[in-house]
Amino acid sequence: MASDRKNQRMKQPTSKGLLRDGPNWPLFVLALLGTALSAYLTFTAWQGKLVAFCTEGAGCDVVLNSRWSTLLGMPTSFWGFLTYALLAAVAWNRYADTQWRWAWVISLFGLLFSLYLTSISFFELKAACPYCLTSLGIMAAIFLMTVIQRPKNLPKFSWGPWLGKTVSVGAAVIVALHLYFAGYWGDAPGPEDPWVKALAEHLSKSDVKFYGASWCPHCQEQKKLFGSSVKRIPYVECSPGGPQAPQASICKQMDITSYPTWVINGQRQTGVLALDTLAQMSKFEYQGGKP
């Protein structure tokens, strides 16, 4: 009876494949959960804040601030957000065969990448992130559900060639990403320097502000000095709408006329400042010693 009802929900209107009478609700709901989770992680990463129920130095903090937390200049969770959003969109494709193929490819890659990041967190970072494990669980559930949902009599389909093609391509992409994170290509951020991390946190907790603009090359130069700890600095974006847009109100109130501008304990400094200069001006002391 169940197979009869399934066949009634799918018809063969054209050579394109089986036509569903509605979206794939289980896929859509799971993808929506993943989208919400990854959106939250992305938002906190952009804000430079700790996620809920995560204290500084805890496993989740270590994982979410490691070199693997950023991919191609964006939080890794942002790419997860795009993956889940794409799966949610695929759920609305009415052609069951096309929907299944896309859901398989996307969820397979998502699962492989999640497994890679999880293995890195366990064996390299010696830490665990409950949020990341939750995302892994959601992606695994989507992939398992996709396997179960495979329509019968898919045109020109054979498991052997399909697995060989999709798994090999997915594995090749994971290897390429690993080489990126290892620094063999691209500009992957390295691990946080303890001294630089402590300095960035000290600046954020002190009476210090770094006013800059996204399009300002000297601001980018200043940020690069902080490396992987850049997300911790007390940065204020003065030109959120671009160089032709009005300046942010907080920067107008502070009469910021050039970028970058540092305000440290009431003293104003313009231009790129060396980290040692920032440490001296902010009276930073690091008990562990500078490497």
Image (cartoon, rainbow, N blue to C red):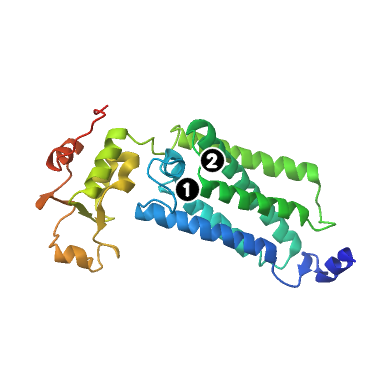
> Position of 235 compared to 85: left or right?
left
* For marks 1 and 2 on the same chain, the one whose residue lies earlier in the sequence: 1
Which residue is the site of mark 2? 117
Q: Name the residue under label 1.
A: 76
Specify the quadrant that holds the N terminus: bottom right
Q: Quadrant of the C terminus?
A: top left
- Give x and y (percent) for residue 98: 72, 60
**What residue do we see at 54% from left, 40% from top?**
117
Toward which corner of the image does residue 58 lie, by quadrant?
top left
Mark 2, other Cα within 10 Å: few <14 / some 14–19 / many ≥20: many
Residue 221: in sight, yes or no? no
Q: Are marks 1 and 2 in contact (CB under 8 Å)?
A: yes
Q: Can residue 161 be seen in this view?
A: yes
Q: How far apart are marks 1 and 2 (CA)?
A: 10 Å
Give the residue displayed 84% in from the left and 57% down from the top.
152
**Label at residue 175:** none
Residue 282 image point, x, y percent:
15, 43
Instruction: State the image coordinates of residue 212 (x, y, percent, origin top left).
Output: 22, 55
Secondary structure at numbered mark 1:
helix
Front residue of 212 and 67 = 67
SS for callout 2: helix
98 sits left or right of 53 in the view: right
